[in-house]
Amino acid sequence: MSISAAIKRSSEKHVVCHKTLVAKQDQVAKVAEMCKDILDFSQGKATHRSAGILEFKVSVDQYEPNVFYFWERYDGNATMGRHNTGPEIRAFMENIQPYLEGPVGMALYEWQDGKIGNVCVQGGPKGEGGLDDATGAGGSGGASHKQTSATLDLGDVQRGEHGDTFGMGSASEGFKFPWQKD
């Protein structure tokens, strides 16, 4: 007689919400202060396991000091929804708008077993797109044969007035990609 048993393997799935806020150049300090306040509030809530907030971080872009990134990881969609529709977060989103260059960019991801998946939903600065683009509800029927992206210039780029220079321009005057003919 032989006994067999199946072992159910469970995986850990979470939801990640990534937000991008671009502050007006003269409002960076105010936006930083408001972000710090909401960070403190959210991390305080995260200390209660029942809140379902697993991570809540705010960082500043190292090259663009007026760009703030939020990294939020929740134990599920319902938890994310409760946190983001609560009175504190709603007030933050409404009150910060006058200090921003544009709308808040947002992308949602699935997080499974410590690995992030493809973007599920995105919108706003550095993440335009979404259902209208996918379904054609924006007027183009869901498919378009026109180029919508800008061309990429691989020449030299300089950061700021006296910043460092980087790019392909200084690599070699005769630089060619393998598929380019002499």
Image (cartoon, grey):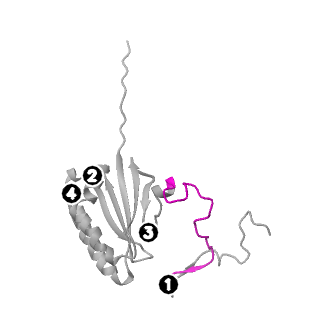
* Residue furthest bottom in the image: 161
Q: Nearer the viewer, mark 2 or mark 1?
A: 2
**Is residue 175 depicted above or below 144 in this figure?**
below
Sequence-wise first label, 2 or 1: 2
Sequence-wise first label, 2 or 3: 2
Numbered mark located on residue 47 in the image:
4
Q: CA distance from mark 4 to mark 2?
A: 14 Å
Numbered mark located on residue 125 in the image:
3
* Secondary structure mainly formed by the magenta segment: loop
Whole-percent x, y for residue 103 in the image: 38, 70
Q: Secondary structure at mark 3?
A: loop
Question: Toward the viewer: 116 or 107?
Answer: 107
Sequence-wise first label, 1 or 4: 4
Going 35% across and 52% down the picture, which residue do you hit? 15
Whole-percent x, y for residue 182 in the image: 80, 70
Name the residue that disc number 2 marks. 79
Residue 6, can we see it? yes
Name the residue that disc number 1 marks. 160
Quadrant assignment for the N terminus: top left
